[in-house]
Image: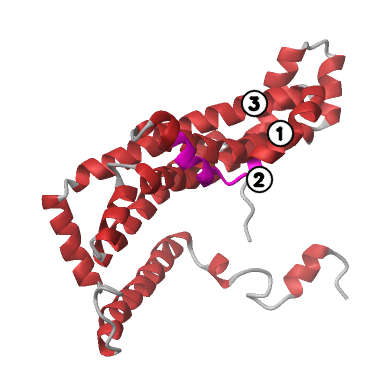
Amino acid sequence: MPSSADELTASLPRGMDGPSSASLPGWLQAVVLPGASLLVAFIALVIWQYLPPALGVPKYIIPVPSALVEEMVRMWSQENLLMHIGSTTTMAVIGFALGGLFGAVFGYLLGLSPLWERILSPYILALQIAPKVAFAPLFIMWFGYNAIPKLIVTVLVVFFPILVNVLQSMRTVDRDLVNLARAYSMNGSQIFWKVRFPSSVPNLMAGLRIGATLAVIGVTVGELVGGEVGLGYLITFGEGQANTAMVFDAIFLLTLIGIVMYWLVAFIETRALHYIPKAHV
């Protein structure tokens, strides 16, 4: 009978101590896994291209991929697609930056002041529960049909996940480390920058990854409700024209923007948290 965890692991048949992909060489994983993903996408596109027509589904209900490409080319040449992409991307990035900044600052301030956290927590909870998209018509009535309403909605959507993540990380800082810092006569500012802030960075980056995807949702809501430019506006315009291909293309581009923003935040997180070992599962 194995006398230790290592002997027990060694006694297991190959492949039972972890996923089979872990036994593949690194270069082979770099080829096989993306190749498998591309194969799945190719099969899905082929089915999408030929199955709806075979079932008699009209193109205005489910347009095939070739029709989406044709519509994308038309939008680029006739609908000034680049301007709409630029507007949505700019608002998403600005709203994400402002929402992330405000969420982090308020999270740290409330984390440093338990009294103010208890006083303000009911209002923070109420604002967090309230559907942010419902504020969009109100902001339009206040500020008009311009970029301000969708920017405010984006900031609100991004703000709360980051606030909650940072606040939670401040609550769970290792008290032994804080006490040790105090034993070395560190003041409050030194304890924050040397103990509390580094401990909170993983949670902060997790909140930023969530916020990066939510930023696109916030901008889209603002453009759907009262925008005159942007991909959300194109969705509304395509709906009014019964142009399903335009709606599909706009949704695809919005998804692409969200993916790129998420990857950029994940890349920054990898560089910022390079000292944290990765779990191999």
Q: Amino acid at mark 1?
A: Tyr
State the CA–CA distance, disc 2 to disc 3. 18 Å
* Quarter of the figure that contains the C terminus: bottom right
Q: Earlier in the sequence, mark 1 or mark 3?
A: 3
Quarter of the figure with the N terminus: bottom right
Q: Which mark is residue 129?
A: 2
Among all residues in the image, which is located at the extreme left? 77
- Front residue of 26/138: it is 138
Asked if 69 appears above or below 125 in the picture, the reply is: below
The answer to whether residue 49 is left or right of residue 136 is left
**Disc 3 designates what residue?**
106
Q: Main secondary structure of the magenta part?
A: helix
| Residue 162 on image: x %, y % | 60, 37
Question: Mark on residue 123?
Answer: 1
Q: Is residue 236 above or below residue 61?
A: above
Let me know if residue 138 is in the magenta part.
Answer: yes
Instruction: State the CA–CA distance, disc 1 to disc 3.
Output: 13 Å
Rendered image quadrant of residue 276: top right
Range of residues picked out in magenta: 128-139
Q: Residues within 10 Å of mark 2 (few under 14, many from 20)?
A: few
Secondary structure under tag 3 reads: helix
Identify the amino acid type marked 2. Ile
Q: Secondary structure beneath disc 2?
A: helix
Q: Nearer the viewer, mark 1 or mark 3?
A: 1
**Circle 1: is it few (<14), some (14-19), or many (20+) Cα within 10 Å?**
few
Secondary structure type for disc 1:
helix
